[in-house]
Image (cartoon, rainbow, N blue to C red):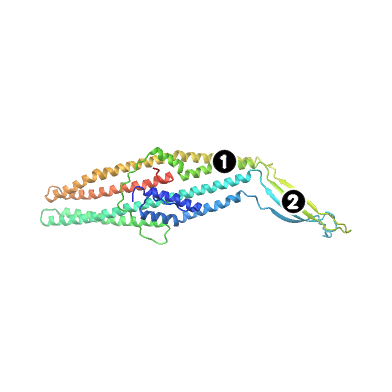
Amino acid sequence: MGHSVTKLVIFMIVALGLAGITGRPLEAASHLWVNPALSQLIEEGLTNNKEIQSFAARVESLKEEIPFAGSLEDPRLGIAILNLPTDTFSFDQEAMTQKQLFIAQKVPWFGKLSLREQRQTLIASRQQALLEAKRLELVRKIATSYYELGFIAKSLEINERLTDMVNQLIRVAETRYASGRGLQQDVLQAQVELSKLLDERITLGKKRRTIEDQINELLNRESFIAVPPPKDLPYPGLRLEIESLQAQSLRKNPLLRVRQTEVDQASVEIELAKKDYWPDMDFKLAYGQREEDFTGRDLPDFVSGSVVINVPLWHKKRQDRNLASKQKNSEAAARFYQNLVQSLPHRVDALVTEIRETQENYRLFSDALMLQAEQWASSSLSAYVVDKVEFNTMINAHIRLLRFELQTDRYLFNIYQKRAELEEILGGPLEP
């Protein structure tokens, strides 16, 4: 693994999203690399997660509705009987009696169909952006849980090493006590530390199972499968330029595209509301067939046509109110968009600052504190053997050494987790 883990994670989301939505094959990413175990978990999650599948199906459903939204209504075909006398119900008694066949077609005012198709296209685009955001969110959750699992596994490893060390110190304390050079309280203190470590191991075991359950849930597995944790992560020497990352987030963040499509959709809704002031037209063409009259005279058939329009007589309660509503909705969509535009750079700045500070903490522990703790533990053990320091000082030095090692790994895993969060906001991998 390396510092490019999350980079491939996010790339896989976008690529898989395009492959799933557009039908294009997933392009190879040979220039990126990732821990094979994490890559497999991500691929399994993107393939099997039911929420992702639901969003993808919704995208396809909305795309299928685009041609429907821009098409005319079905023509109407009907039959009728006109002017049939009720005293005889005879078709040849009156000259105006006829059997009629008609066809009718409703035609919206010019431009309405195009606007409806635009609206549906924007709805589908919004759902597609939501799908991309969900994929990014899922990968971030998988990656974050995976790195947290790595820290829990490291904590269990440190716990085991501490337990072995305390057991050794107990034997040393018992030997010194038996020879009259040590104190019984040293033995008791070591036993207390051992009991605390055993309790900690139980707690860590529960946490590990909880994290593994979370990962199994994200992957939509039917039964529990143990998840191997990451090991030996290299230090991710990230060089983060805040301004370029902020610009990237404003270009690629899928939730920003969601807000933008909402703004565009609101504009289309306003245009449609304005079109409602103009009448739709209902065209009708009819053919009326007449029988011979009672004198035997052959009566000609009739052809009729009509156009019906709706009159916006109640526009103050209907069209005016509808237009005002769409305008308010447009204002709200614009505010949501601007709010996200303003907040994204701050979120990027906060994460970059947190990553940088965590990197400094990691370097401080790995380069200075760990070395000092090792020297302290070694010297305290030597001094304890010759009765120059107390048992409490010696055991605390050894415990502090391993706790520092664990804290160093905590910072390392945090860097990977925060990078996953950052690339979710960026909408893709860190750009070179």
Q: Which residue is mark 2?
A: 285
Location of residue 174 by image quarter: bottom left
Amino acid, disc 1: Ser
**330, 112: nearer the viewer:** 112
Viewed as shown, does residue 330 lie left or right of 105? Answer: left
Q: Residue at x 15, y 55 (%)?
A: 172
Residue farthest toward the left in the current orientation of the protein: 180
Viewed as shown, does residue 225 lie left or right of 324? Answer: left
Residue farthest toward the right in the current orientation of the protein: 295
Q: Percent from the top left, x then y, of residue 90?
A: 83, 60
Amino acid, disc 2: Leu
Q: Residue at x 31, y 48 (%)?
A: 234
Res. 267 mark = 1
Q: Percent from the top left, x then y, of residue 365?
A: 26, 44
Q: Residue at x 68, y 53 (%)?
A: 75
**115, 180: nearer the viewer:** 115
Q: Height in image: 154 above or below 272?
A: below
Q: CA distance from mark 1 to mark 2?
A: 37 Å
Q: Earlier in the sequence, mark 1 or mark 2?
A: 1
Residue 20 in sight: yes
Residue farthest toward the bottom in the current orientation of the protein: 223
Please tell me whether mark 1 or mark 2 is closer to you in this view.
Answer: 2
Q: Percent from the top left, x then y, of residue 152?
A: 31, 53
Mark 2 residue element: strand
The answer to whether the residue labelled 1 contacts the one labelled 2, judged by CB atoms less than 8 Å apart, is no
Viewed as shown, does residue 94 lie left or right of 34? Answer: right
Q: Percent from the top left, x then y, of residue 372?
A: 21, 44
Res. 215 mark = none
* Other-residue count near label 2 (Cα within 10 Å), few / some / many at <14 / 14–19 / ≥20: some
Mark 1 residue element: helix
* Other-residue count near label 1 (Cα within 10 Å), few / some / many at <14 / 14–19 / ≥20: some
